[in-house]
Image (cartoon, grey):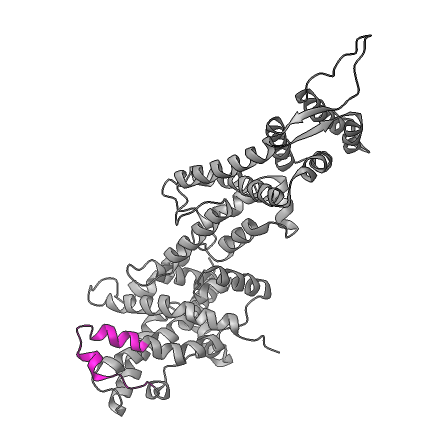
């Protein structure tokens, strides 16, 4: 790797960690002021400011190469570094901290109560300032993030940007034990949404939850289809032939095969006494129709032949035009819901099989959704439905950086290890406090970011 690339990488990491360290330092300074016993005094404000600035400085990566230091200096001279960090630790911010009742500090909670008060102060001031300082978010990312937020997901600021170093730093903060990370809560929301999409209940999509949901939707489909039949007569068979129109011989052959199978399910024609067969309609029982439609729809989803997919979709439409009108409005709604739930269940079946604990990988969902030509086309056309939206959310927000990023992770980890924080157990408190404050305040910053009007 060339010196210029290393320098740019170090400068980028310094900017990214500085942007995250500034609000963390501000929050830490606030907490320091609240727990010092000197709140409300200039001395307490000054000590809190120094403590916050010191922590922010420790958490900001300092370039170790001459090229990196030069690039950081250039960023500083341009004013970009200050804009990225955006939230200096200033005494006016600390001076606006409301006085904490002495009773809070006197209780058994002590510093914990003061820390919560510090977090509240961050919510009133530092969070809004941090959100204002962050750069604009891509409009499509912003739209999807707002929809995800309505579903119950909560994101850190680094998850809103395609910045590799920022993503790694954010992921490392979530890996710190007992630091208030949001990944567990987001996984639970993700699981719940998947379970709801197949008509199940629970917080984890275990194999038993999956089996119960699939049995429920399958039973519903069976009950509705078994209660109805469709007439198989010459007029109906002629309508099915339209699906073969203007298609190549190999496509016509596959379509005709399905037509022959459907007619065979209705049984042989009645023979006439004088020879020949009657043209009267035969009734195809719904219980026999259901597996036929399941096979037909499976072929439609799995084929990579666009002409065949189109022709079989036309065939499916002709069949359902004869079956669906027989259903009452309530039956039609229940049938559509059960079919949708069953289809989603078949799509995510491989993921459930690979997840014995019931936590489905958000990143893997996109692979399952686009595993066949039908899914790829639906996602490309923006017609992936609720499952497609979940796949987008998992792919964009609930993932680690795109590769192993071994070198980059080493650099980011050096922010802690290089400062000696990973050696001295007592010094390890600083990164824990930083991760705790960032993980807890970060979603509030992102919420402010989602509400921020676009820059004119």
- Residue 88 image point, x, y percent: 40, 81
Residue at point 67% right, 39% down?
324
- Residue 267 image point, x, y percent: 68, 18
On screen, residue 8 versus residue 409, left or right, reads: right
Q: Is residue 74 visible?
A: no
Name the one closer to the observer, 90 or 256.
256
Q: Is residue 423 above or below residue 280?
A: below
On screen, residue 237 versus residue 294, left or right, reads: right
Give the residues drawn in magenta, as a range: 97-118
Q: Is residue 11 magenta?
A: no
On screen, residue 234 versus residue 57, left or right, reads: right
Residue at point 39% right, 44% down?
358
Q: Is residue 275 visible?
A: yes
- Residue 240 image point, x, y percent: 76, 30
Name the one closer to the observer, 39 or 222.
222
Q: Is residue 450 above or below residue 250?
A: below
Q: Residue 175 falls in which quadrant of the image?
A: bottom left
Residue at point 63% right, 53% down?
382
On screen, residue 446 versus residue 304, left or right, reads: left
Q: Identify the residue at the far bottom of this view.
A: 42
Q: Identify the residue at the far top of this view.
A: 274
Q: Is residue 102 magenta?
A: yes
Q: Is residue 411 above or below residue 274?
A: below
Q: Quadrant of the image for the C terminus?
A: bottom right
Count of labels shown?
Answer: 0
Name the one closer to the observer, 439 or 2.
439
Residue at point 37% right, 71% down?
60
Name the one closer to the observer, 10 or 393.
393
Q: Residue 289 falls in which quadrant of the image?
A: top right
């Amino acid at each position: 790797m060339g010196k210029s690339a290393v320098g740019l990488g170090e400068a980028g990491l310094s900017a990214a960690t500085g942007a995250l360290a500034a609000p963390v330092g501000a929050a830490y300074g606030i907490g320091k002021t609240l727990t010092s016993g000197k709140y409300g005094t200039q001395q307490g404000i000054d000590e809190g400011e120094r403590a916050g600035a010191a922590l922010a400085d420790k958490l900001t990566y300092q370039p170790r190469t001459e090229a990196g230091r030069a690039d950081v200096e250039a960023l500083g001279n341009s004013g970009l570094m200050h804009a990225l960090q955006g939230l200096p630790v200033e005494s006016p911010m600390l001076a606006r901290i409301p006085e904490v009742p002495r009773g809070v500090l006197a209780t058994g909670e002590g510093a914990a109560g003061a820390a919560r008060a510090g977090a509240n102060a961050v919510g009133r001031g530092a969070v809004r300032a941090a959100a204002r300082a962050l750069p604009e978010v891509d409009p499509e990312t912003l739209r999807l993030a707002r929809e995800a937020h309505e579903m119950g997901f909560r994101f850190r600021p680094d998850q809103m940007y395609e910045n590799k170093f920022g993503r790694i730093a954010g992921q490392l903060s979530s890996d710190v034990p007992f630091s208030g990370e949001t990944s567990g809560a987001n996984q639970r929301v993700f699981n719940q949404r998947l379970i709801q999409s197949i008509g199940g209940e629970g917080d984890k999509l275990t194999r038993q939850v999956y089996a119960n949901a699939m049995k429920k939707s399958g039973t519903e489909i069976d009950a509705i289809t078994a209660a109805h039949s469709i007439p198989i007569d010459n007029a109906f068979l002629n309508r099915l032939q339209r699906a073969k129109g203007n298609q190549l011989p190999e496509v016509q052959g596959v379509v005709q095969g399905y037509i022959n199978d459907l007619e065979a399910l209705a049984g042989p024609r009645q023979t006439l006494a004088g020879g020949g067969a009657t043209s009267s309609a035969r009734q195809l029982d719904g219980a026999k129709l259901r597996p036929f439609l399941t096979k037909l729809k499976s072929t439609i989803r799995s084929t990579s032949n666009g002409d065949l997919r189109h022709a079989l979709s036309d065939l499916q439409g002709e069949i359902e035009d004869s079956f669906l009108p027989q259903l009452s409005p309530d039956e039609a709604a229940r049938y559509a819901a059960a079919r949708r739930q069953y289809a989603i269940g078949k799509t995510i079946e491989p993921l459930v099989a690979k997840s014995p604990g019931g936590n489905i990988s958000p990143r893997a969902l996109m692979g399952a959704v686009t595993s066949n030509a039908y899914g790829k086309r639906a996602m490309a056309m923006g017609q992936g439905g609720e499952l497609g939206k979940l796949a987008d959310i998992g792919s964009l927000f609930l993932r680690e950086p795109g590769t192993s990023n071994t070198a980059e992770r080493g650099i980011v980890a050096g922010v802690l290890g290089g400062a000696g924080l990973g050696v001295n157990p007592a010094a390890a408190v600083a990164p824990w406090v930083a991760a705790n404050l960032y993980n807890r305040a970060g979603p509030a910053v992102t919420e402010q970011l989602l509400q921020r009007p676009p820059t004119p």
